[in-house]
Amino acid sequence: MKNILLLLLIVSNSTYSEGFWSDLKTITGGHIKDIANRFQDDQIIDGKVVATGVFNEEADGQDFAHNGKGSATIKAYKGKKYLQLGKDFYSSPGPDYHVYVSDKTNINNEKDFLTSKQVELGALIKGSGASYYELPANTPSDSVTIWCKEFNEYIASADIIAH
Protein backbone atom coordinates (compact mmCIF):
# COMPACT_ATOMS: atom_id res chain seq x y z
CA MET A 1 0.00 0.00 0.00
CA LYS A 2 2.87 2.32 0.84
CA ASN A 3 4.37 1.77 -2.63
CA ILE A 4 1.08 2.56 -4.34
CA LEU A 5 0.73 5.82 -2.42
CA LEU A 6 4.33 6.72 -3.26
CA LEU A 7 3.69 6.00 -6.96
CA LEU A 8 0.54 8.15 -6.93
CA LEU A 9 2.47 10.97 -5.26
CA ILE A 10 5.20 10.80 -7.90
CA VAL A 11 2.70 10.70 -10.75
CA SER A 12 0.64 13.55 -9.29
CA ASN A 13 3.74 15.75 -9.20
CA SER A 14 4.86 14.86 -12.71
CA THR A 15 4.30 16.84 -15.89
CA TYR A 16 1.83 14.16 -16.93
CA SER A 17 -0.39 14.57 -13.88
CA GLU A 18 -3.14 16.56 -15.61
CA GLY A 19 -3.54 13.93 -18.32
CA PHE A 20 -3.17 11.09 -15.84
CA TRP A 21 -5.90 12.36 -13.52
CA SER A 22 -8.18 13.19 -16.44
CA ASP A 23 -7.73 9.67 -17.86
CA LEU A 24 -8.26 8.13 -14.43
CA LYS A 25 -11.50 10.11 -13.99
CA THR A 26 -12.71 9.05 -17.46
CA ILE A 27 -11.83 5.41 -16.87
CA THR A 28 -13.38 5.24 -13.40
CA GLY A 29 -16.56 7.15 -14.27
CA GLY A 30 -17.01 5.31 -17.56
CA HIS A 31 -16.60 1.90 -15.97
CA ILE A 32 -19.08 2.71 -13.21
CA LYS A 33 -21.66 3.86 -15.78
CA ASP A 34 -20.99 0.80 -17.96
CA ILE A 35 -21.44 -1.61 -15.07
CA ALA A 36 -24.68 0.09 -13.96
CA ASN A 37 -26.09 -0.10 -17.52
CA ARG A 38 -25.52 -3.86 -17.60
CA PHE A 39 -28.38 -4.25 -15.12
CA GLN A 40 -30.97 -2.51 -17.33
CA ASP A 41 -33.68 -4.63 -18.91
CA ASP A 42 -32.94 -6.07 -22.34
CA GLN A 43 -34.13 -3.88 -25.21
CA ILE A 44 -35.57 -5.90 -28.08
CA ILE A 45 -37.19 -4.53 -31.21
CA ASP A 46 -39.70 -6.55 -33.20
CA GLY A 47 -39.19 -6.94 -36.88
CA LYS A 48 -38.12 -9.20 -39.68
CA VAL A 49 -34.52 -10.41 -39.47
CA VAL A 50 -32.78 -9.45 -42.72
CA ALA A 51 -29.15 -10.10 -41.75
CA THR A 52 -27.21 -11.80 -38.95
CA GLY A 53 -23.72 -11.98 -37.54
CA VAL A 54 -21.63 -13.24 -34.64
CA PHE A 55 -18.85 -11.30 -32.93
CA ASN A 56 -15.45 -12.75 -33.74
CA GLU A 57 -13.94 -13.94 -30.47
CA GLU A 58 -10.66 -14.79 -32.22
CA ALA A 59 -9.95 -11.29 -33.62
CA ASP A 60 -6.33 -10.25 -33.21
CA GLY A 61 -7.45 -6.88 -31.80
CA GLN A 62 -9.01 -8.51 -28.76
CA ASP A 63 -7.21 -9.16 -25.49
CA PHE A 64 -8.19 -9.98 -21.91
CA ALA A 65 -9.34 -6.40 -21.23
CA HIS A 66 -10.88 -5.55 -24.63
CA ASN A 67 -13.24 -8.16 -26.03
CA GLY A 68 -16.79 -9.03 -26.94
CA LYS A 69 -18.96 -11.90 -28.04
CA GLY A 70 -22.52 -12.75 -28.99
CA SER A 71 -24.88 -12.13 -31.86
CA ALA A 72 -26.02 -9.15 -33.90
CA THR A 73 -28.92 -8.90 -36.33
CA ILE A 74 -30.36 -6.32 -38.67
CA LYS A 75 -34.12 -6.10 -38.38
CA ALA A 76 -36.65 -4.32 -40.59
CA TYR A 77 -39.56 -2.78 -38.70
CA LYS A 78 -42.14 -0.22 -39.86
CA GLY A 79 -40.06 0.97 -42.82
CA LYS A 80 -36.84 1.38 -40.84
CA LYS A 81 -33.84 -0.85 -40.12
CA TYR A 82 -32.29 -1.52 -36.75
CA LEU A 83 -29.16 -3.17 -35.44
CA GLN A 84 -30.10 -5.54 -32.63
CA LEU A 85 -27.40 -6.82 -30.29
CA GLY A 86 -28.60 -10.16 -28.93
CA LYS A 87 -29.39 -11.25 -25.40
CA ASP A 88 -26.14 -13.20 -25.63
CA PHE A 89 -24.08 -10.06 -26.33
CA TYR A 90 -21.24 -9.34 -23.91
CA SER A 91 -18.34 -6.88 -23.97
CA SER A 92 -15.59 -6.37 -21.45
CA PRO A 93 -16.35 -3.37 -19.23
CA GLY A 94 -15.16 -0.05 -20.64
CA PRO A 95 -15.38 3.67 -20.14
CA ASP A 96 -16.57 4.96 -23.52
CA TYR A 97 -17.80 2.21 -25.85
CA HIS A 98 -19.66 3.14 -29.02
CA VAL A 99 -21.39 1.11 -31.73
CA TYR A 100 -20.48 1.52 -35.39
CA VAL A 101 -21.55 -0.10 -38.64
CA SER A 102 -19.21 -0.25 -41.58
CA ASP A 103 -18.95 -0.97 -45.29
CA LYS A 104 -16.03 -3.32 -44.63
CA THR A 105 -15.97 -6.92 -43.37
CA ASN A 106 -13.25 -8.74 -41.45
CA ILE A 107 -12.57 -5.86 -39.06
CA ASN A 108 -10.28 -7.52 -36.54
CA ASN A 109 -8.21 -4.71 -35.02
CA GLU A 110 -7.70 -0.95 -34.75
CA LYS A 111 -6.10 -0.60 -38.22
CA ASP A 112 -8.99 -2.41 -39.95
CA PHE A 113 -11.51 -0.21 -38.16
CA LEU A 114 -9.71 3.05 -38.89
CA THR A 115 -9.39 2.26 -42.61
CA SER A 116 -13.08 1.49 -43.05
CA LYS A 117 -16.00 3.83 -43.66
CA GLN A 118 -17.94 3.81 -40.40
CA VAL A 119 -21.20 5.27 -39.22
CA GLU A 120 -21.57 5.74 -35.47
CA LEU A 121 -24.92 4.59 -34.11
CA GLY A 122 -24.29 5.89 -30.60
CA ALA A 123 -22.92 4.90 -27.23
CA LEU A 124 -23.20 1.24 -26.30
CA ILE A 125 -26.40 1.05 -24.28
CA LYS A 126 -25.68 -2.25 -22.54
CA GLY A 127 -22.36 -4.01 -22.23
CA SER A 128 -24.18 -7.24 -21.51
CA GLY A 129 -27.50 -8.21 -23.05
CA ALA A 130 -29.81 -6.94 -25.76
CA SER A 131 -30.02 -3.40 -27.08
CA TYR A 132 -30.89 -1.90 -30.45
CA TYR A 133 -29.93 1.08 -32.58
CA GLU A 134 -31.71 2.67 -35.53
CA LEU A 135 -29.76 2.57 -38.77
CA PRO A 136 -29.87 5.83 -40.73
CA ALA A 137 -31.19 5.38 -44.29
CA ASN A 138 -28.65 4.05 -46.80
CA THR A 139 -26.17 3.20 -44.07
CA PRO A 140 -23.65 0.47 -44.93
CA SER A 141 -24.03 -2.44 -42.54
CA ASP A 142 -21.60 -5.14 -43.66
CA SER A 143 -20.20 -5.28 -40.13
CA VAL A 144 -20.72 -3.90 -36.65
CA THR A 145 -17.86 -2.83 -34.38
CA ILE A 146 -17.71 -1.95 -30.70
CA TRP A 147 -15.03 0.73 -30.25
CA CYS A 148 -13.71 2.62 -27.22
CA LYS A 149 -13.91 6.18 -28.46
CA GLU A 150 -11.96 7.78 -25.61
CA PHE A 151 -8.90 5.57 -26.00
CA ASN A 152 -9.18 4.53 -29.69
CA GLU A 153 -9.33 0.87 -28.77
CA TYR A 154 -10.86 -2.00 -30.73
CA ILE A 155 -13.23 -4.11 -28.64
CA ALA A 156 -15.11 -6.47 -30.98
CA SER A 157 -16.58 -6.81 -34.46
CA ALA A 158 -19.07 -9.00 -36.30
CA ASP A 159 -19.61 -9.44 -40.02
CA ILE A 160 -23.28 -9.08 -40.93
CA ILE A 161 -24.55 -11.45 -43.60
CA ALA A 162 -27.82 -10.74 -45.45
CA HIS A 163 -30.47 -13.46 -45.60
Image (cartoon, helix red, strand yellow):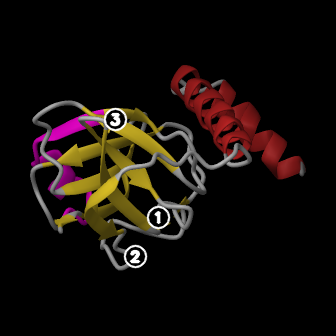
Q: Earlier in the sequence, mark 1 or mark 3?
A: 1
Query: Residue 114: horizontal and vertical position, in percent?
Result: 17, 46
Please say whether residue 108 is one of the residues in the magenta stretch: yes
Query: Residue 44: horizontal and vertical position, in percent?
Result: 52, 49
Which of pointers 3 and 2 indicates the residue nearer the eye? 3
Q: Amino acid at mark 1?
A: Asn
Does 121 sit above or below residue 128? above
Label drawn at residue 134: 3
Which of pointers 1 and 3 indicates the residue nearer the eye? 3
Disc 2 crowd rating (10 Å Cα; few below 14, some 14-19, many 20+) is some
Q: Quadrant of the C terminus?
A: bottom left
Residue occupying image coordinates x 36% and y 68%: 55
Disc 2 secondary structure class: loop
Question: Disc 2, disc 1: CB below 8 Å?
Answer: yes
Label drawn at residue 67: 1
Query: Residue 105: horizontal and vertical position, in percent?
Result: 14, 63
| Foreground residue among 98 and 71 | 71
Residue occupying image coordinates x 67% and y 35%: 33
Disc 1 secondary structure class: loop
- In the picture, measured across the screen, residue 58 lies left or right of residue 36, that is left
Disc 1 crowd rating (10 Å Cα; few below 14, some 14-19, many 20+) is many
Residue occupying image coordinates x 31% and y 51%: 75
Query: What is the CA distance from the residue labelled 2 to the residue labelled 1?
Result: 7 Å
Q: Amino acid at mark 2?
A: Glu
